Image: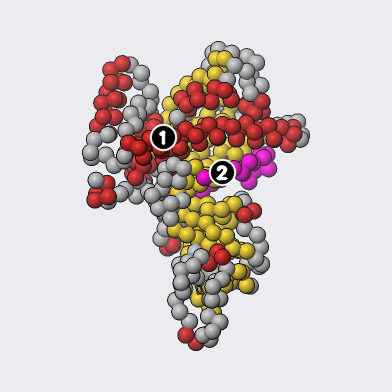
């Protein structure tokens, strides 16, 4: 069922909102920053280019160490990154044919995780192996299914924006950010924070057009008007030049942001045309407490009619998006620091979309058990 999300700014409505926030901060409400990601989804854990043929690398999902192995022949596979013998990382080992051999005493494991050789024991009495993770490599990303492996086949694989469409050029980006993934979802969905980016973007006034709220999805739509400052290069490239957009909302470009658990998307389109920009992004928890995440983003820009123009302007676009992302990263890490110092979430949220998003992330995630929540 879809519920529409509207923004009523009448004073009594805002007072009600504040009241409901006070209730949200009550004892019965689970602190969102203690909610963990549901592992029963496909999550990227590395970029394809990080893993060369015949090599293995270490990666992680929410404190679980994972070794990715790319044999000389055949597809990538993923094993628990602990040798069954003495628990040292298998990612320190070497790839031999279709197996990885531990660096310490040479136990070897195949793609099923079974131990297939102990050099000093013979093949008759092989010990147990290690856990294996369902693994897929798609569009330059290596995904694993860290939850119940039996659910992997029936869990829909995410649609990765416009990355496979040759009409688009895609920037693959991401780095580690020291915050709970929920801060990242909130940051992208709440476009009122354009205020912070005014140095990069000029003064932009976002206008909230409406949104949707479904059991697994929250959507927000915005349009923007420039109310001061020059249009930056990077933005002109994405949106096109806007000599006329000085004061009034043009309503031409609509930005739609969705959290479709656990992923997030953002696209910008003008009326019925295909999106000029299409972003797919996910924030993968690194440590068991979920206080650091690794971002995997696919930012696809539609190629303009003028051939080669996008390639030429690409370094500018990369610089522009890096500067925006650096500002976002700094602010979400500061939010996380405040949470740490205050011992919990004191946020007073007034925007219905963000409250709907927080409810979704709470519902869909793994809540702490009551003893741990105290
Ligand atoms: S620790 Fe891996 S073979 Fe001994
Ligand atoms: Fe931002």
Label of residue 174 in the image: 2
Splitting the image into 4 quarters, where does residue 354 fall?
Answer: top left
- Coordinates of residue 126 in the picture (x, y in percent): 48, 82
Splitting the image into 4 quarters, where does residue 274 fall?
Answer: top right
Nearer to me, 334 or 233: 334
Label of residue 9 in the image: none
- Coordinates of residue 25 in the picture (x, y in percent): 27, 34
Q: Give the side of residue 130 with respect to residue 70, left or right.
A: left
Q: Is 110 drawn above or below residue 172 in the view shown?
A: below
- Coordinates of residue 281 in the picture (x, y in percent): 52, 42
Res. 192 in view: yes
Q: Give the side of residue 48 with respect to residue 209, left or right.
A: right
Q: How is the image coloured?
A: secondary structure
Residue drawn at (23%, 38%) of the image: 27
Extent of the magenta region: 155-176
Q: Residue furthest top?
A: 247
Residue drawn at (52%, 52%) of the image: 44
């Amino acid at each position: 069922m879809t519920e529409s999300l509207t923004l009523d700014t009448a004073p009594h409505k805002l007072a009600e909102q504040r009241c409901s926030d006070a209730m949200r901060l009550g004892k019965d409400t689970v602190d969102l920053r203690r909610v963990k990601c549901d592992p029963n989804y496909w999550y990227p854990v590395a970029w394809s280019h990080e893993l060369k043929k015949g090599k293995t690398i270490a990666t992680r999902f929410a404190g679980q160490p994972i070794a990715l192995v790319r044999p000389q022949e055949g597809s990538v596979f993923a094993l628990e990154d602990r040798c069954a013998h003495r628990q040292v990382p298998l990612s320190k080992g070497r790839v031999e044919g279709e197996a990885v051999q531990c660096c310490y005493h040479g136990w070897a494991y195949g793609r099923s995780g079974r131990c297939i050789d102990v050099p000093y024991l013979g093949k008759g009495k092989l010990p147990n192996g290690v856990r294996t993770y369902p693994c897929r490599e798609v569009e330059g990303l290596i995904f694993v299914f860290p939850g119940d492996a039996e659910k992997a086949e029936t869990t829909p694989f995410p649609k990765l924006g416009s990355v496979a469409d040759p009409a688009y050029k895609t920037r693959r980006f991401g780095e580690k950010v020291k915050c709970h993934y929920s801060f990242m979802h909130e940051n992208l969905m709440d476009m009122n924070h354009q205020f912070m980016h005014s140095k990069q973007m000029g003064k932009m006034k976002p206008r909230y057009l409406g949104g949707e709220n479904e059991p697994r999805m929250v959507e927000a739509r915005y349009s923007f008007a420039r109310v001061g400052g020059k249009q930056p290069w990077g933005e002109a490239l994405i949106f096109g030049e806007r000599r006329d957009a000085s004061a009034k909302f043009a309503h031409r470009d609509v930005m739609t942001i969705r959290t479709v658990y656990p992923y997030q998307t953002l696209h910008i389109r003008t009326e019925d045309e295909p999106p000029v920009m299409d972003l797919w992004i996910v924030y993968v928890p690194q440590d068991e407490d979920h206080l650091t995440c690794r971002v995997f983003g696919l930012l696809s820009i539609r190629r303009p009619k003028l051939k080669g123009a996008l390639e030429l302007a690409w370094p500018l676009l990369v610089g522009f998006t890096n500067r925006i992302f650096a500002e976002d990263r700094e602010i979400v890490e500061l939010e996380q620091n405040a949470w740490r110092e205050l011992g919990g979430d004191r946020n007073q949220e007034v925007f219905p979309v963000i409250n709907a998003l927080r409810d979704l992330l709470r519902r869909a995630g793994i809540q702490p058990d009551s003893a741990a929540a105290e």
